[in-house]
Image (tube, rainbow, N blue to C red):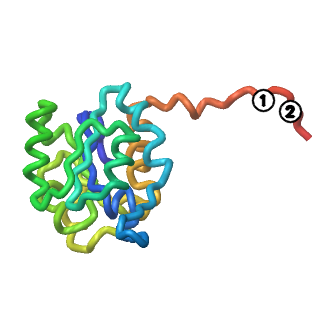
Amino acid sequence: MVDYKAITAILFDIDGVLTDGSIILDAKGEEIKNFHVRDGQLISFMQSKGIVFGAISGRDSVAARKRMEDLKIDFVRFGQGKKETAYSEFKKEFKRQDKEILYIGDDVIDIPVLTLAGIAVAPADASFYVVPHVHLQTKALGGRGVLREVIDAIIQQREWNEWSAPRKRIGFTKG
């Protein structure tokens, strides 16, 4: 079992983690991306608990920028050929140490950061080159709730789960 207690920051790649990695172009050449809504559902809750979120992407797109803005991600860097540079910027800006950072990546461009982060995670369908560099792989495929699976694991371990208590049923009868 992975111990998430030291984690105060979650950083992630976008393409292949929050999306399935597909690049869809419309008639004007603009990228269209699919994001899983559950990935974003608990970010503000986690931020209220002191967790900082960051996205470090090798690519840049209007769709990804809009999604990161909508999710109110604390730290966002696009077009990062050397993601470790952005990772270092994050550590300096937010005064974090490697052991406090969980990073989610899916491809070879993520390996330098995966080897630095306190906890390294990859989606189920990550490149086989990435797998030896991570502490765990999610059950979820890229774009299918990878971030949410990680968030849920942290919530469960830290017992922040305020949703699992049974609710009283009003107006319903057994039968």
Count the numbered circles shown.
2
Q: Does dot 1 land on a helix, a strand or a loop?
A: loop
Residue at horizontal 69 percent and vertical 29 percent from the top: 167
Viewer-side residue, 29 vs 150: 29
Residue at horizontal 35 percent and vertical 41 percent from the top: 69
Q: Is residue 133 visible?
A: yes
Can you identify the residue that label 1 sits on? 169
Which quadrant of the figure has residue 88? top left
How would you rate the neighbour count of disc 2 (Cα within 10 Å): few for under 14, some for 14-19, many for 20 or more? few
Answer left or right for 168 relative to 119.
right
Answer left or right for 27 relative to 136.
right
Viewer-side residue, 104 vs 31: 31
Answer left or right for 118 relative to 154.
left
Above or below — where is 122 with respect to 96?
below
Going by the numbered disc 1, the residue's amino acid type is Arg
Q: Is residue 24 visible?
A: no
Residue 18, percent across and down? 37, 56
Residue 148, percent across and down? 43, 48
Going by the numbered disc 2, the residue's amino acid type is Phe
Above or below — where is 116 with respect to 106?
above
Residue 162, percent across and down? 53, 28
Q: CA distance from mark 1 to mark 2?
A: 6 Å
Q: Confirm or deny contact between disc 1 and disc 2 (CB under 8 A).
A: yes
Above or below — where is 17 with respect to 72?
below
Can you identify the residue that label 2 sits on? 172
Q: Does dot 2 land on a helix, a strand or a loop?
A: loop
Q: Specify the label residue 110 is tagged with.
A: none
Most extreme residue toward the front is: 28
